Image (tube, rainbow, N blue to C red):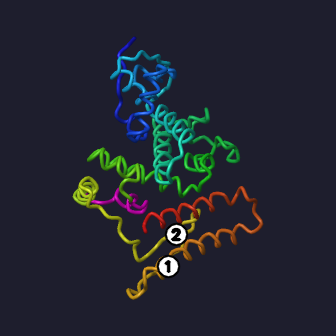
Amino acid sequence: MHEIIIDEEFRGLLPVLDTETYRLLEENIQENGCRDPLVVWNNILVDGYNRYRICTENDIPYNTVSKEFDSREEVLIWIISNQVSRRNLTPLQLSHFRGLHYRADKRIVTNSGRNQYNTQKVDEPHNEGHPKSLSTAVRLAKQYKVSRATIERDSKLSRAFEIIGEISPEAKSKLLSGEVAIDKKKLEALTSMSNEEIEAIVTEIDDGSYKRRTPAASLPVETRDTAVYIELTDTELSERQILEAAVQTITNGYNYVLQQAGNGSIAALRPALRSYTDSLEDLLRSL
């Protein structure tokens, strides 16, 4: 058996098991053996990091199955698809995975000059109505049932997690696990901050002093490609009034999309509903 290679980027995509869940998994493997094979690509471990750790620490035999991929990006997309289908992810985790998927897919297109879902070169004209001819953002928006704008925002968010992880993997893990709360707008803005500002935030996350700030005075609510703003400039507004105004703004944005859609199908309104619920989730986490 070839020596298995641990890839930190691949491992970083997998949620860390809490102590009790890990203990139960370890007891099960010790009692029943490692029944599910580990998935490898060119001897790099792709799936089964917890099982691999338990088996090596306890000298338990395991099997592997090799999968073929053309690039690291395809491995990333495979891992992401597995995580999305297997687990109950938080909205923040799901946004992170959607953004990673988008960025990996874009690199495949850039590196090959071809859309991996279409054998034609990406700049060749073809039937725009065919799902395989759509842009990466539009295609993934359809796959995940969100708007294209959401996919593009998720790309910034995943890049922010990458930047944080380069400074402190522990801080990234705390954010993704929900141990430390941070809103998506803050993460998206982080990609344009200076190194000093980013490092200051990461330090606060690491030492436990980071506190989620009150929502900004200008609250954008995005539904599809429409942004609706409400200005909360009155400093005498109570917290409840600010909250009610924020909820009303989110609802107004969704109602605006409904009006524009007219008698459109329910399926066509799903991206707007997803954006509406995502906005409410962001607001809830900011409280």
Instruction: Say what secondary structure mark 1 lies in.
Output: strand
Provide the residue designation for mark 2: 221
* Vertical arrangement, residue 252 with respect to residue 209, above or below: below
Look at label 1 and name its amino acid. Answer: Ile
Q: Nearer the viewer, residue 223 or 248?
A: 248
- Residue visible at 59% across and 56% down? 147
Is 185 contained in the magenta span? yes
Q: Position of residue 88 (x, y in %)?
A: 54, 46
Q: Earlier in the sequence, mark 1 or mark 2?
A: 2
Q: Position of residue 67 (x, y in %)?
A: 51, 22
Q: Is residue 78 left or right of residue 27?
A: right
Above or below 246: residue 39: above
Up/down of 71 relative to 126, above or below:
above
Q: Could you tell me which residue is drawn at 68 percent across and 60 percent down?
A: 269
Residue 255, by quadrant, is bottom right
- Where residue 169 sits, quadrant-wise, is top left
Q: Is residue 46 magenta?
A: no
- Dot 2 alpha-carbon crowd within 10 angstroms: few under 14, some 14 to 19, many 20 or more: many
- Residue 104: x, y in percent? 46, 40
Is residue 67 visible in the rendered image? The answer is no
Left or right? Give the position of 36 relative to 168: right
State yes or no: discs 1 and 2 in contact (Cβ < 8 Å).
yes
Report the magenta residues as a range: 182-194
Position of 80 relative to 96 (above/below): above
Label 1 and label 2: CA atoms lie apart by 9 Å
The tag on residue 230 is: 1
Badge 1: few (under 14), some or many (20 or more) residues near its Cα, within 10 Å? some
Residue at the (61%, 35%) spot, across then down: 120
Residue type at tag 2 = Val
